[in-house]
Structures are given as structure tokens and as C-alpha cells.
Amino acid sequence: MTEPKSKNITWHKPLITCADREERNRYKGVVLWLTGLPSSGKSTLGHEVERLLFERGCNSYVLDGDNIRHGLNKNVGFSPEDRKENIRRIGEVAKLFAEAGVIVFTAFISPYREDRDQARALNEPGRFFEIYCECSVGECENRDPKGLWQRARKGEIEDFTGVSAPYEEPLTPEIIVQTDKYGLEECAEQIMRHLEEQGVIPPL
């Protein structure tokens, strides 16, 4: 969907701009797009970095895949078409958060490169960071905190990424965190360093 259905709408420019918010906040509103296989550590890592940002006085928020499907996206499933709509909506919501001066995390599998690229395209350059939580299938299955991998292997869950549905790895992500080789603290600090280097947050 490239154009809104209704033609009787007008875009209203805000009085307060992103630049205004950044000048007051001393940090940038950006989208941190966490992607990876199920159980690769996306939500866990997002919440840990959120905690570190909170300690520094930054407003941040984690949009978690499961949580969003309880409300905003409760009417979409896991077919390729539904996944596409799921990510389209999240891309739009994440953009609004960033424009409001929030450092927003999206913790979604988001298995298709095209959908992630479209989410990126919604944002100005330097406001979208794709973070690939790289983790082997074996390690994801070993973790499996929800028991989903095991159920998918038994055929109890359809369209499960990594088993019966594909995952397209990012080609040029801003950050790759090897969550199967390094601990949570190390991965979180890697992201924090990158945000400092890119001028999103001031260094300590």
C-alpha cells in the first residue's frame, strides 16, 4: 500500500521539529531495528540496552513482537502477506516514536529483507540502525524459552521462521551482535558504543 485510501486528508506540519527535540534532549530519536531468528535474543537485548539508556536519562521504548500482536497487530498472522503487513505497521509506528524524540527498539524476527528495507526508507539517513542478532539455529533451539522450536519441529506450528518459513539475513546491517558467542552485557555495550560513535547519544 503506497497511497492512503482516503483522498480527503491533508498532511499537517508540526510546530516542534526533531531538531528542536534533539537540542533539548541532547540525544537523537532513532529506530534500532533488531532482527534475527526466534530465540536469538532480540527482546532480551533490546530491554537491556533500554535499561542502559534509561540510566543515562534517555527516553527509549521496546516494541516487542509478541506484545504488539496482543493489540495493534492482533488481526495479523504469520503468512508471508501477514508478516509483511505486521512489519509495515511497526515501521510506521517506530518512525513516529523516533520523530517524537524517543530511541525506539523493534524486536521482531522481520524475516524478509524487502520489508526491513521499506521500514528503513521511512526514516531520514542516520535515524535507522539495523541490528542483526546473529545466532546459530542450534543455539536458538537450545534456548527455546517458549518451546516454539520444538513444537515447530513436530509440525504443530505453521510458518515458523527457521523451520517451515525462511529467514533472509541482513546484507549490510549497521551492527552485528553475535548473541551465541558473547554475553548479554557485552552485546549491549557493543550497541551503546555504536550509538556513541554515531552521535546518537553523547559519550560518558
Image (cartoon, grey):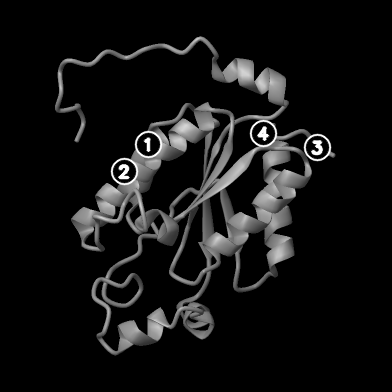
Q: Quadrant of the N terminus?
A: top left
Q: Nearer the viewer, residue 84 or 55?
A: 55
Which numbered disc, 2 or 3, marks the residue that appears first in the sequence?
2
Q: Residues within 10 Å of mark 4 (few under 14, many from 20)?
A: some
Which is more foreground, mark 2 or mark 4?
Answer: 2
Q: Amino acid at mark 2?
A: Arg
> Mark 2 sits on what residue?
88
Q: Can residue 152 be seen? A: yes
Q: Residues within 10 Å of mark 1 (few under 14, many from 20)?
A: some
Q: Residues within 10 Å of mark 3 (few under 14, many from 20)?
A: few
Cβ–Cβ under 8 Å for marks 1 and 3: no
Q: Can residue 193 be seen? A: no
Cβ–Cβ under 8 Å for marks 1 and 2: yes
Q: Which mark is residue 92?
A: 1
Cα distance between the residues tagged 2 and 4: 24 Å
Cα distance between the residues tagged 2 and 3: 33 Å
- Dot 2 falls on a residue whose secondary structure is helix
Which is more foreground, mark 1 or mark 3?
Answer: 1
Q: Amino acid at mark 1?
A: Glu
Which is more foreground, mark 2 or mark 3?
Answer: 2
Q: Amino acid at mark 3?
A: Pro
Q: What residue do we see at 49% from left, 72% from top?
A: 39
Which numbered disc, 2 or 4, marks the residue that appears first in the sequence?
2
Q: Position of residue 74 (x, y in %)?
A: 29, 56
Q: Residues within 10 Å of mark 2 (few under 14, many from 20)?
A: some
